[in-house]
Image (cartoon, coloured by chain):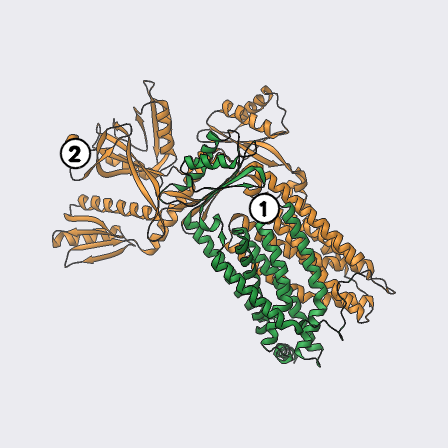
Chain colours: A orange, B green
């Protein structure tokens, strides 16, 4: 008998190996130290910016490896990291605040590889350096706020329709409305039922009470929205940090993952990310006496608040507008050259503002800034507890009826104006967040990890090659070819899959698959030896060896695959990386160790009719 | 041709003759492991306990006692300080705190070190895990191990037979117990990478037992005259050189990983080393002994094959 693969099978194997190798290629070219320039609010990246960047490079005597403009971004490739740092400083000064100038590592992949989608492996934060944050959103606060809004709008509606109520209040998860007369009760039920369609609606005629409650679907939606909003806001804030390729992702019910490659100043990053705050615009209560209130006689419907920089202010409880309607806020100067903050609201916010300020021109309006600081305690249900710190950050007279665009003047120094604008702009969070996990890896440790990981892989690999070569002689060399191909395939497949990142445990995973990929060949070769000993001819021994070994290898690998999948499901970050490399390694090693070696063995020995001995 | 073992079907190594001894050995070691686990407990790492860990590189070899004094003066007396890798690299661990904004402890610590010790220190690593995250990770980790074992039990039962499946899982249990026992004895820190190692060991050790199980099944069909004990002996002898060869190559790569892979991967490679050795032992002795005790026989391995043939014939008709 002879051992031959049909031509198509050989070609398919060759094709698969070639494709794997092709996609592994970009990793040989490495990465350039680069600077990435993109526009922030109000800015625009155009040819003029490009010229400015180029002249700045020339002024510093730097000859870049390349300057390109793509997707509204300018990418400057430089020769070293020192040049990169120096040029970043220079460009930040030259371009001003309308641009984000971020450090980046740009793959130096040649164009022809890029056109077929070739990309080098993405390195995890433990190899690249950077910060990983896991943040938790305080859902209780989000829900509390929504109930508060509901209470206010119910009250407003009842007043508008001249329905007299004795009480509108939050009670647990409900908003409870108590009416005075049967007539009012009927009117309220009709009106509220119309407005709050889709809510759990519970009306009790005997006590003239209406209870409104959000349904589970609405609760779910609210949670989702709170997370989405936080993700958006975090994205804006991360942009302020000037980070290239940040990751901001929802994780599970109420968590958000933020990954900032290359960031080292974690204190600053946290300050910006963790500045959880909300804003409310409210009217100052001018009808009551402030001094009375300060002595403890706070009038009904108003609350006394501290003002930033000292003093107290009496504000109406009614909230004109919350910070989530703010679209943009910028600093500038008024007619008298004093700093001011101009604010843009969304359409709904503009309407609310317009309605509220219609009859209140010349009345003072306050901006109440609410910060949430984690107390470090947890609630009985395991979620985090926050302290609510409220402070009036600005009081200004309304000079005219306000709309979607208005400005706050008299905010103090330029620095104060900038701070206020930043707070307004960053958007007010509907629900506060807190960092529950942080993992920072400095760039030196990252580079060291890459180096030691590579050394370990190389050393382990070479030892296994020697081992196999000695033990199985020529067949061992075939197995070694398969092992080498397997390594290239793992790298190729991982570079191809967009979500796969290489981590430190992932490198351990690669080395481990090298050890395990050998196993398939050991099983096959041992089997061939046994068949030979039983007196079969070499060609028969090869065929039977592969046949008998196959199901064993498949079973063994499938169970390992099961554990890899489980690890992927429960693991986080770098452990997920381990699971991914392990899983990919199992699949590629099945291919190279079984099909690959068989093809080579068939081509080398399979055609020889008079083969009397195997080098195994 | 190099060979580790010479296999002769008529004269196999009689592994099962030693099964009394190995069973006693296994039980004694298991008791020791459980004793160590209950007395010494496990040295849970940051991933599971929560807290803060900071690794910094000083420009000079670090004076640890001075460092401890500085930390004690700044209300960080509960910090654990140790060298990590080199004389210059220092690892500081701070247990989780109540009532403090714990996520900023790392930053505070870095500020203190910069002011009092070395302005040019390099941040190598900062890790902060909130207590609730730690609990979740521990829960997820335990769950992963249990789910892995159940999935494997199901798969092996489906592919082979319940006796082989159950013995495989008991063997896995022994592997995990042994690794954890040694970790508790030596007080090596258990972090998330150890969980990864445990699952990798499960995969590896299962490899071994499937190769053996496969051979046992094959031999039961082929060697009709032999009793179960000698079938198992023959199967173990036949697979012995593969078992040793694979264990050896895997051990080689793990030892290189331990030597060159850096300090962060030490725990992982130690767990894997123990796992490979124990896994080899358990797939040769523990599992075979249990399979035999469960009363495996030719009949118990036959029925699925007969059913399959019957189905084929019907399809042809």
Q: Chain of mark 2?
A: A
Q: Position of residue A328 (x, y in %)?
A: 38, 33
* Snapshot quadrant of residue A365: top left
> In the image, is residue A417 above or below residue A347?
above
Q: Position of residue A20 (x, y in %)?
A: 68, 49
Q: Residue at x 39, y 43 (%)?
A: A434
Nearest the viewer among B41 and B120 is: B41
Q: Which SS class for mark 1?
A: helix
Which residue is denoted by mark 1 in the rendering?
Answer: A504
Q: Residue at x 35, y 26 (%)?
A: A417
* Snapshot quadrant of residue A471: bottom right
> In the image, is residue A336 above or below residue A13?
above
- Total label count? 2
Mark 2 Cα shell of 10 Å, populated few (<14), some (14-19), many (≥20): some
Nearest the viewer among B121 and A545 is: B121
Which residue is denoted by mark 2 in the rendering?
Answer: A293
* Snapshot quadrant of residue A10: bottom right
Q: Is residue A96 left or right of residue A549?
A: left
Outermost residue toward the right? A610
Q: Position of residue B281 (x, y in %)?
A: 63, 64
Q: Residue at x 17, y 33 (%)?
A: A294
Which corner quadrant holds the C terminus of chain A? bottom right
What separation in Å lies between label 1 and label 2 (alpha carbons)?
61 Å
Q: Is residue B12 left or right of residue B77?
A: right
Mark 1 Cα shell of 10 Å, populated few (<14), some (14-19), many (≥20): many
Q: Which SS class for mark 2?
A: helix
Asked whether residue A331 appears in the rendered view, the answer is: yes
Nearest the viewer among A540 and A455 is: A455
Q: Position of residue A416 (x, y in %)?
A: 35, 26
């Amino acid at each position: 008998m002879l051992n031959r693969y049909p031509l198509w099978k050989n070609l398919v194997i060759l094709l698969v190996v070639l494709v794997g190798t092709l996609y592994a290629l970009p990793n040989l070219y490495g990465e350039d130290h680069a600077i990435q320039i993109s526009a922030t609010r109000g800015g625009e990246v155009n040819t003029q910016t490009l010229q400015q960047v180029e002249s700045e490079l020339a002024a510093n005597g730097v000859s870049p490896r390349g300057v390109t403009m793509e997707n509204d971004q300018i990418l400057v490739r430089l020769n070293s990291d020192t040049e990169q740092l120096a040029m970043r400083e220079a460009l930040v000064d030259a371009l001003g605040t309308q641009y984000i100038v971020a450090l980046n590592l740009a793959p130096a992949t040649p164009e022809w590889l890029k056109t077929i989608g070739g990309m080098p492996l993405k390195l995890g934060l433990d190899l690249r350096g950077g910060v990983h944050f896991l943040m938790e959103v305080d859902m209780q606060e989000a829900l509390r706020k929504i109930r508060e809004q509901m209470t206010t709008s119910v009250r407003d509606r009842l007043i508008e329709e001249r329905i007299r109520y004795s009480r509108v209040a939050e009670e647990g998860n409900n908003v409870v409305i108590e009416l005075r007369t049967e007539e009012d009760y009927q009117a309220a039920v009709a009106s509220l039922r119309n407005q709050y369609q889709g809510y759990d609606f519970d009306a009790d005629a005997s006590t003239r009470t209406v209870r409104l409650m959000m349904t589970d679907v609405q609760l779910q939606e609210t949670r989702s929205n709170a997370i989405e909003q936080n993700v958006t806001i975090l994205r804006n804030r991360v942009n302020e940090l000037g980070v290239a390729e940040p990751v901001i992702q929802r994780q599970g019910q109420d968590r958000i993952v933020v990954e900032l490659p290359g960031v080292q100043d974690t204190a600053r990053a946290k300050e910006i990310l963790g500045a959880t705050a909300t804003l409310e615009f409210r009217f100052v209560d001018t009808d009551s006496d402030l001094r009375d209130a300060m002595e403890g006689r706070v009038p009904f419907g108003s609350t006394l608040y501290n003002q930033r920089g000292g003093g107290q202010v009496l504000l109406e409880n009614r909230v004109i507008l919350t910070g989530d309607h703010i679209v943009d806020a910028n600093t500038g100067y008024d007619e008298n050259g004093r700093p001011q903050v101009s604010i843009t609201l969304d359409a709904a916010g503009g309407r609310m503002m317009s309605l509220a300020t219609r009859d209140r021109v010349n009345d003072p309006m306050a901006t109440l800034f609410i910060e949430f600081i984690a107390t470090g305690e947890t609630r009985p249900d395991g979620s985090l507890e926050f302290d609510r710190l409220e402070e009036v950050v600005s009081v200004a007279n309304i000079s005219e009826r306000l709309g979607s665009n208005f400005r706050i003047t008299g905010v103090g120094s330029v620095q104060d104006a900038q701070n206020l604008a930043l707070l307004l702009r960053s958007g007010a969070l509907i629900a506060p967040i807190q960092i529950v996990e942080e993992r920072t890896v400095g760039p030196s440790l990252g580079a060291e990890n890459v180096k030691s990981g590579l050394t370990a892989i190389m050393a382990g690999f070479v030892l296994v090659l020697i081992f196999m070569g000695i033990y199985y002689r020529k067949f061992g060399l075939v197995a070694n070819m398969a092992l080498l191909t397997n390594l290239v395939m793992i790298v190729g497949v991982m570079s191809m899959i967009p979500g796969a990142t290489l981590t430190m445990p992932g490198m351990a995973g690669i080395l481990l698959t090298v050890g395990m990929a050998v196993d398939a060949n050991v099983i096959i070769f041992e089997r061939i030896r046994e068949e030979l000993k039983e007196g079969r001819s070499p060609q028969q021994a090869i065929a039977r060896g592969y046949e008998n070994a196959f199901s064993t290898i498949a079973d063994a690998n499938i169970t390992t695959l099961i554990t890899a999948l489980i690890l992927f499901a429960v693991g986080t970050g770098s452990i997920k990386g381990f699971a991914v490399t392990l899983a990919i390694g199992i699949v590629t090693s099945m291919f190279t160790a079984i099909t690959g070696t068989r093809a080579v063995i068939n081509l080398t020995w399979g055609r020889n009719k008079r083969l009397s001995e195997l080098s195994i | 041709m190099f060979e580790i073992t010479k296999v002769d079907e008529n004269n196999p190594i009689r592994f099962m003759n030693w099964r009394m001894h190995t069973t006693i050995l296994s039980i004694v070691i298991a008791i020791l492991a459980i004793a160590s686990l209950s007395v010494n407990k496990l040295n849970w790492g940051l991933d599971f306990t929560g807290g803060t860990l900071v690794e910094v590189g000083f420009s000079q070899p670090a004076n640890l006692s001075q460092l401890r004094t500085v930390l004690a003066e700044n209300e960080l007396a509960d910090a654990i300080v140790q060298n990590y890798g080199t004389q210059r690299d220092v690892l500081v661990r701070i247990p989780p705190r109540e009532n403090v904004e714990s996520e900023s402890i790392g930053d505070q610590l870095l500020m203190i070190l910069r002011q009092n010790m070395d302005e040019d220190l390099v941040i190598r690593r900062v890790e902060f895990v909130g207590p609730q995250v730690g609990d979740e990770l521990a829960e997820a980790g335990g769950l992963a191990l249990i789910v892995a074992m159940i999935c494997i039990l199901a798969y092996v039962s489906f592919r082979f037979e319940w006796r082989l499946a159950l013995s495989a899982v008991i063997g896995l249990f022994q592997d995990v117990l042994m690794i954890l026992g040694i970790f508790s004895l030596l007080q090596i820190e258990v972090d998330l990478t150890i969980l990864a190692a445990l699952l990798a060991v499960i995969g590896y050790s299962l490899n071994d037992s499937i190769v053996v199980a496969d051979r046992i099944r094959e031999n039961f069909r082929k060697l009709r005259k032999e009793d179960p004990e000698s079938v198992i002996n023959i199967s173990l002898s036949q697979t012995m050189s593969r078992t040793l060869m694979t264990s050896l190559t895997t051990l080689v790569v793990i030892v290189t990983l331990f030597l060159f892979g850096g300090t962060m991967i030490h725990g992982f490679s130690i767990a894997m080393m123990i796992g490979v050795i124990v896994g080899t032992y358990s797939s040769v002795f523990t599992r075979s002994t249990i399979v035999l005790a469960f009363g495996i026989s030719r009949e118990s391995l036959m029925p699925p094959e007969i059913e399959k043939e019957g189905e084929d014939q019907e399809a042809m008709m």
